[in-house]
Image (cartoon, grey):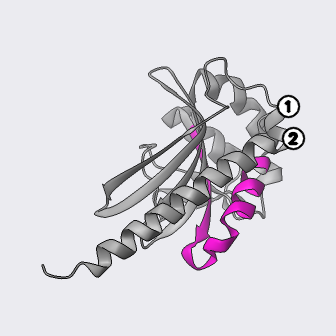
Amino acid sequence: MQQTEFFLHKKNITDKIYELLGLLSTELKQTPVHQNFDFPKDADHRSGKISKGENYQGLPFIILDFPRLFTRNDIFAFRSWFWWGKCFNFTLHLSGASLDRYAPFLLANIDQLRHTEVYYCMNANPWQHEIVEGNYVLIDELNDQALQKQLTDHGFIKICRELKLERWEDLLTVGRETYELFLSTIQ
């Protein structure tokens, strides 16, 4: 109870992650795919939002949602997520009206995602973020029928790419590359 050093380290790391996610948001806005993309009408594709929490499976996290649209009937989000002690990941999440609009493009362009270390969410709960068996499967391991079945059964698409914490210096590069890859498959 008398140790305070950890909290000082945590604050320094949190500040650095906020800075990196802010830089990532700026980089994403400057990509040609972003500038030419036809976003959903009410999507925030200009500023985004960085938020944090203290308890995803007992560990803190920081999230950049950019672009983002979260309503009861529509989700369109590219989420860059830092999970303390675990990983970074980049996720495209579509449901509702955005799913109806963009899923046909994703399914038609799914081969662009093969051999790129992209995972597909197979869990019925779209708010499971950890890449483990039961939550995600490498797209390379799925055929078109399995992808369509998940879409039909669960009513959302979530694709994800992970970045190990040891590679944190690659956050901007991998985040930008993933964003460009994901958006290019849904237009």
Q: What residue does disc 2 label?
A: 32
Left or right: 182 as drawn, with respect to 13:
right
Residue type at the position of mark 1: Asn
**Residue at image x 87%, y 41%?**
32
Left or right: 89 as drawn, with respect to 174:
left
User: In the figure, 86 relative to 139: above or below?
Assistant: below
| Figure quadrant of the C terminus | top right
| Figure quadrant of the N terminus | bottom left
Quarter occupied by residue 99: top right
Asked if the magenta segment contains residue 119, the reply would be no
What SS does tag 2 mark? helix
Question: Where in the figure is residue 106, as x and y percent of width and height?
Answer: 74, 39
**Residue at image x 63%, y 76%?**
167
Residue type at the position of mark 2: Pro
Using the image as rendered, state which of residue 107 and residue 179 is in the foreground. Answer: 179
Question: Where in the figure is residue 185, as x and y percent of width and height?
Answer: 79, 42
**Residue at image x 79%, y 48%?**
180
**Residue 131 can be seen in this image:** no
Question: Where in the figure is residue 50, as x and y percent of width and height?
Answer: 50, 45
What SS does tag 1 mark? loop
Q: Which mark is residue 36?
A: 1
Q: Which residues are magenta?
A: 157-180
